[in-house]
């Protein structure tokens, strides 16, 4: 099933955390914002993983990285008004903007997203 992945869902799979099984079942062919890709790489490196290992592991997941273009950037910025009280990051809003544009469910580990009323199908991986 086509989906948009938040960085947290990809990290759950990469780090074999709760939610890994759910993410594994949808990751191939899923979309990931380039903003979220940056976040995943950064967090994996912060955990001590080598850059090359991270890139190889992520490539095996077979998701599709989508460039964070001007329309997505504008919408993610606009979402700040609607999500500020929930503390969503730029990466969170990039994921939501992509899911909204593509009319696909957004998969995350962030339970706070279930409080959002944006008309976007939000699904928790754990």
Image (spheres, helix red, strand yellow):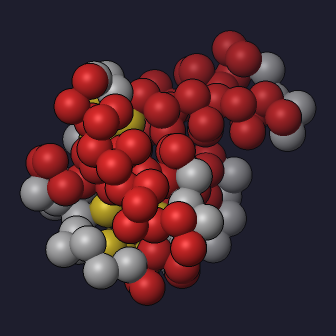
Specify whether residue 21 is in view.
no
Where does residue 77 sit, x and y in percent of width and height? 39, 43
- Report if residue 117 is visible in the image: yes
- Classify residue 38 by image quadrant: top right
Is 20 on the left or on the right of 34, as rendered?
right
Q: Is residue 34 above or below residue 111?
A: above
Q: Is residue 5 shown above or below 111?
A: above
What is the x, y in percent for residue 23? 43, 61
- For this rendering, which residue is in front, 73 or 62? 73
**Residue drawn at the location 61% of the way across and 38% of the way down:** 40
Of 62 and 109, the residue lying toward us: 109
Tell me the quarter of the picture where residue 12 sits: bottom right
Residue 56 coordinates in the image, percent (x, y): 57, 21
**The one of 46 and 121 positioned closer to us in this rendering:** 121
Residue at 71% in and 31% down: 42
Residue that extends furthest to the top in the rendered view of this protein: 52
Q: Residue furthest right?
A: 48
The one of 5 and 91 positioned closer to us in this rendering: 91
**Image location (x, y in percent) of residue 60:** 45, 31
Tell me: residue 65, above or below residue 11. above
Q: Is residue 108 left or right of residue 119?
A: right
Identified at 45% across, 66% down, the residue is 83
Q: Is residue 119 left or right of residue 6?
A: left
Q: Is 10 drawn above or below residue 47 in the view shown?
A: below
């Amino acid at each position: 099933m086509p989906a948009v992945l938040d960085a947290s869902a990809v990290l759950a799979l990469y780090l074999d955390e709760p939610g890994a099984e759910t993410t594994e079942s949808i990751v191939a062919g899923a979309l990931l914002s380039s903003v979220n890709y940056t976040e995943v790489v950064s967090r994996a490196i912060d955990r001590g993983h080598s850059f090359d290992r991270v890139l190889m592991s992520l490539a095996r997941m077979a998701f599709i990285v989508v460039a964070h273009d001007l329309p997505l950037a504008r919408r993610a910025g606009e979402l700040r008004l609607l999500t500020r009280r929930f503390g969503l990051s730029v990466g969170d809003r990039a994921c939501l903007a992509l899911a909204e544009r593509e009319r696909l469910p957004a998969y995350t580990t962030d339970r706070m997203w279930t409080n959002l009323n944006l008309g976007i199908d939000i699904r928790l991986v754990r």
